[in-house]
Image (spheres, rainbow, N blue to C red):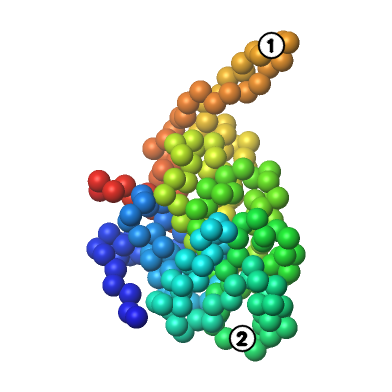
């Protein structure tokens, strides 16, 4: 079934046509699934990996099978299918591996793969870079990256660093916080102090830098 895109979706793809690492931060209802899928097709790698929440595995598989029949879609949450890929990956043509966030870091072979497009659905799932899933994904070696989220930070820019890193903006976490996050030390009971985020700075510059690294923010009212 051929894909019919809306104008705002075509616009997002046009704005990122020269990028191989992109983020589509589109409000719910704006069709980031279709934008991300079309970008994946445009990037043209034979091997593609889609990481999503477990509850959406079947939805994504049906989506790819319906609109992208040229790809073999492999459910990597099923042991038999996963084994099939490992045994036949050199013979398999264009394919999409679908796996969930809580499983991917248990499948070490993903770290050995190269020259693929990595698409993260609800990329806010890796906003805490200290979790096993985030550490693992940040170690992966994709050629291209597509991030999809309606709420990439939930308004909290301090949660964006790991996604910034995947987009290829090689700013250290310390420098990122120094430039964009306002903090202060707050005393707790017992005389202990903790750092608390109290606001943000240089937000226009942050958004400009994100745009320079392939990030599109789009609200429904736009």
Q: Which residue is more in the foreground, 210 or 42?
A: 42
Task: Residue 4: give x, y in percent of width and height.
Answer: 28, 72
Kindly identify the residue that appears in the image at 40 percent across and 70 percent down: 38
- Residue 36 position in % (x across, y down): 43, 64
Per the rendering, the mark at residue 168 is: none
Question: Label 1, on which residue?
Answer: 189
At 45% from the left and 48% from the top, the residue drawn is: 210
* Mark closest to the chain's N terminus, 2 or 1: 2
Please say whether residue 144 is visible from this viewpoint. Answer: no
- What residue is rendered at 46% in x and 39% in y? 154
The image quarter containing residue 158 is top right
Residue 144 horizontal/vertical position (percent): 54, 66
Q: Nearer the viewer, residue 200 or 136?
A: 136
Residue 85 in view of the camera: yes
Tell me the element at label 2: loop
Position of 129 compared to 164: left or right?
A: right
Res 66 quadrant in image: bottom left
SS label for mark 1: loop
Neighbourhood count class around disc 1 (C-alpha, 10 Å): few under 14, some 14–19, many 20 upward = few
**Residue 140 sits above or below residue 200 on the image:** below
Mark 2, residues whose alpha carbon is within 10 Å: few (<14), some, or many (≥20)?
Answer: some
Mark 2 to mark 1: distance in Å? 60 Å
On screen, residue 37 versus residue 188, left or right, reads left
């Amino acid at each position: 079934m051929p894909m019919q895109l809306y104008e705002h979706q075509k616009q997002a793809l046009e704005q990122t046509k020269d990028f191989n690492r992109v983020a589509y931060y589109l409000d719910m209802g704006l069709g980031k699934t279709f934008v991300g899928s079309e970008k994946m097709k445009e990037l043209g790698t034979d091997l593609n990996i889609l990481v999503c929440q477990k509850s959406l595995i079947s939805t994504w598989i049906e989506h790819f099978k319906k609109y992208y029949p040229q790809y073999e879609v492999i459910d990597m949450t099923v042991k038999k299918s996963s084994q099939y890929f490992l045994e036949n990956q050199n013979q398999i043509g264009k394919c999409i591996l679908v796996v969930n966030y809580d499983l991917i870091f248990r499948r070490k072979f993903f770290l050995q793969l190269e020259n693929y497009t990595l698409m993260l659905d609800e990329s806010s799932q890796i906003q805490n870079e200290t979790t096993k899933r985030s550490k693992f994904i940040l170690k992966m070696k994709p050629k291209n990256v597509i991030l999809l989220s309606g709420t990439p930070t939930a308004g909290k820019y301090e949660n964006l660093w790991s996604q910034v890193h995947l987009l290829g903006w090689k700013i250290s976490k310390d420098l990122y916080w120094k430039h964009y996050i306002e903090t202060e030390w707050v005393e707790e009971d017992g005389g202990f102090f903790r750092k608390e985020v109290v606001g943000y700075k240089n937000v226009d510059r942050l958004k400009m830098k994100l745009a320079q690294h392939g990030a599109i923010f789009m609200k429904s009212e736009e």
